[in-house]
Image (tube, helix red, strand yellow):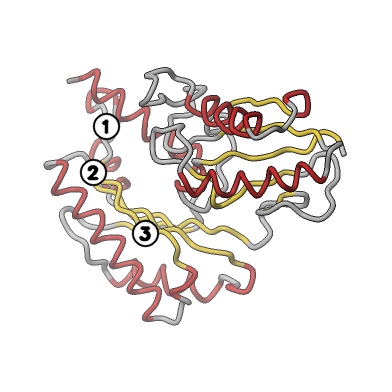
């Protein structure tokens, strides 16, 4: 049981490192999904100080402490997230900018290694708010191929995504790749790298497990399958290569978009 606690704790730590630092956090009493007035005011103050014109989206994640059954705590964490979402919208925050609301359940702790268990539990009964700023992807990052590119440009396509734990191309992904084949046939000198990505994996692992092969090569296999598909459609293999990037580069727009491949332009 102690080993299981260590694993869950590491999983959660890895998730946090990939997600980044929350811009605001509110805390709940034990076994409650309502907030006291001080915590409500924290959200109201957050709304007042944030410039929504510079925000692409906001993500809300809820948690519980380690006590109680898993199913109960997942439901409780979801209700905590809904509470925060409602306070945001009731106080004028644009609901269309709230793109992710997710209850994560309980946070397991190693009781024998925590100095102040009560304080730790109180900090784990919380909801975190994360912001994705507009244009935060930076220059040279695109969601579609452009008429012209420069070396170093990165293109990720929102229709080339994968099921959780899978490296298999979906029918939608194949249609998108067929369109890319036509473009690459026109731009015959372009060379590129195909990078595979994963979500939801602790940072101490270099990659996730591919459920189809049972190998810890999920991001690599995603890139490889795109590479093979393009090659089978007539794209010269000398123009491209593939790598797996694991979970090193989350986009901050939800787990689905982190289960992706990117094209990095190497030569025009």
Query: To which quarter of the image does residue 228 belong?
Result: top right
Task: Point out the image quarter for the C terminus.
Answer: top right
- Give how far across and how far down residue 254 sits, in percent: 47, 51
The residue closer to the viewer here, 38 or 66, is: 66
Mark in front: 1 vs 3: 3
Element type where label 1 sits in the image: loop
Query: To which quarter of the image does residue 245 belong?
Result: top right
Task: Point out the image quarter for the N terminus.
Answer: top left
Label 3, residues with CA under 10 Å away: few <14, some 14-19, many ≥20: some
Q: Which residue is mark 2?
A: 65
Label 1, residues with CA under 10 Å away: few <14, some 14-19, many ≥20: many
Q: Which residue is mark 3?
A: 101
Identified at 61% across, 60% down, the residue is: 133
Q: Which residue is mark 1?
A: 109
140 up-or-down from 91: above or below: above
Mark 1 and mark 2: Cα distance apart in space = 8 Å
């Amino acid at each position: 049981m102690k080993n299981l606690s260590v694993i869950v704790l590491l999983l959660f730590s890895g998730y946090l490192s990939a997600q980044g630092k929350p811009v605001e956090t509110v805390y709940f009493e034990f076994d409650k999904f309502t907030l006291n007035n001080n915590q409500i005011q924290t959200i109201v103050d957050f709304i007042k100080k944030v410039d929504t014109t510079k925000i692409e989206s906001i993500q809300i994640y809820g948690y519980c402490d380690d006590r109680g059954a898993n199913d109960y705590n997942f439901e409780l964490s979801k209700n905590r997230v809904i509470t925060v979402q409602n306070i945001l919208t009731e106080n004028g925050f644009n609901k269309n900018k709230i793109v992710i609301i997710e209850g994560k359940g309980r946070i397991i702790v190693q009781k024998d290694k925590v100095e102040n268990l009560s304080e730790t539990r109180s900090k784990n009964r919380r909801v975190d708010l994360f912001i994705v700023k507009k244009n935060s992807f930076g220059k040279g990052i695109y969601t579609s191929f452009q008429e012209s590119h420069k070396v170093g440009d990165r293109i990720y396509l929102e229709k080339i995504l994968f099921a959780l734990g899978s490296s298999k191309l979906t029918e939608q992904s194949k249609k998108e790749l067929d369109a890319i084949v036509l473009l690459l046939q026109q731009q015959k000198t372009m060379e590129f790298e195909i990078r595979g990505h994963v979500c939801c994996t602790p940072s101490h692992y270099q990659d996730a497990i591919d459920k189809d092969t049972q190998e810890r090569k999920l991001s690599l296999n995603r890139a490889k399958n795109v590479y093979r598909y393009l090659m089978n459609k007539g794209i010269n293999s000398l123009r491209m290569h593939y790598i797996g990037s694991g979970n090193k580069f989350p986009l901050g727009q939800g787990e689905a978009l982190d289960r992706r491949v990117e094209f990095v332009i190497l030569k025009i």
